[in-house]
Image: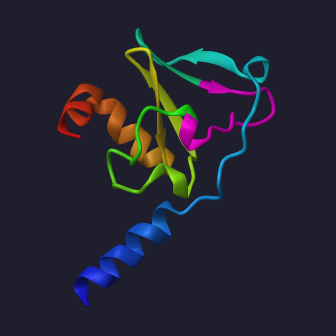
């Protein structure tokens, strides 16, 4: 029962609408760090599909990226997708630790 409640909580807090695909020229890089950047368009955040990111699951909450990508981060030449900006923020605190733990 507890496990089912936790699963519903996680799915409810990370459930975003599926991302739409955009073309390369609609994205403009915004530097967040020496090797990290986030892409966004002039009027809204760029949309990524699961095929466009290097991870299959959100490193923080474990949500599959096929459920929707709300935010992305570039690290070490790869794009990683996250279900929420909070998960991305936690990832960016120590990206290498999360990548090697997968």
Is 53 positioned to the left or the right of 18 in the image? left
> Residue pushed farthest bottom?
1
Q: Which residue is at 60% across, 17% downward?
A: 30
> Residue pushed farthest front?
51
* 8 or 31, nearer to the observer: 8
Q: Overall secondary structure of the magenta stretch?
A: loop
Location of the N terminus by quadrant is bottom left
Q: Which residue is at 72% across, 38% downward?
A: 21
* 57 or 35, nearer to the observer: 57
Location of the C terminus by quadrant is top left
Q: Quadrant of residue 54?
A: top left
Q: Is residue 55 above or below residue 68?
A: above
Q: Quadrant of residue 91?
A: top left
Q: Whole-percent x and y of residue 76? A: 37, 15
Q: Whole-percent x and y of residue 55? A: 40, 38
Q: Which residue is at 43% across, 54% downward?
A: 64
Is 30 positioned to the left or the right of 1 in the image? right
Query: Is residue 89 one of those drawn in magenta?
Result: no
Q: Is residue 57 above or below residue 95?
A: below
Q: Whole-percent x and y of residue 88? A: 43, 40
Q: Which residue is at 78% across, 17% downward?
A: 25
Q: Quadrant of residue 89?
A: top left
> Magenta part of the protein: which range?
39-51
Query: Is residue 42 one of those drawn in magenta?
Result: yes
> Residue pushed farthest top?
34
Q: Is residue 74 above or below residue 19?
A: above
Is 14 positioned to the left or the right of 57 in the image? right
Q: Whole-percent x and y of residue 36? A: 44, 18
């Amino acid at each position: 029962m507890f496990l089912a409640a936790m699963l519903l909580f996680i799915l409810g807090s990370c459930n975003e609408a599926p991302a739409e695909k955009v073309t390369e020229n609609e994205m403009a890089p915004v530097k967040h760090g020496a090797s990290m950047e986030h892409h966004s368009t002039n009027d809204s955040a760029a949309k990524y599909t699961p095929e466009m990111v290097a991870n299959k699951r959100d490193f923080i909450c474990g949500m599959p990226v096929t459920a929707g990508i709300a935010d992305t981060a570039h690290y070490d030449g790869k794009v990683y997708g996250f279900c929420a900006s909070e998960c991305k923020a936690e990832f960016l605190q120590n990206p290498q630790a999360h990548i090697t733990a997968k």
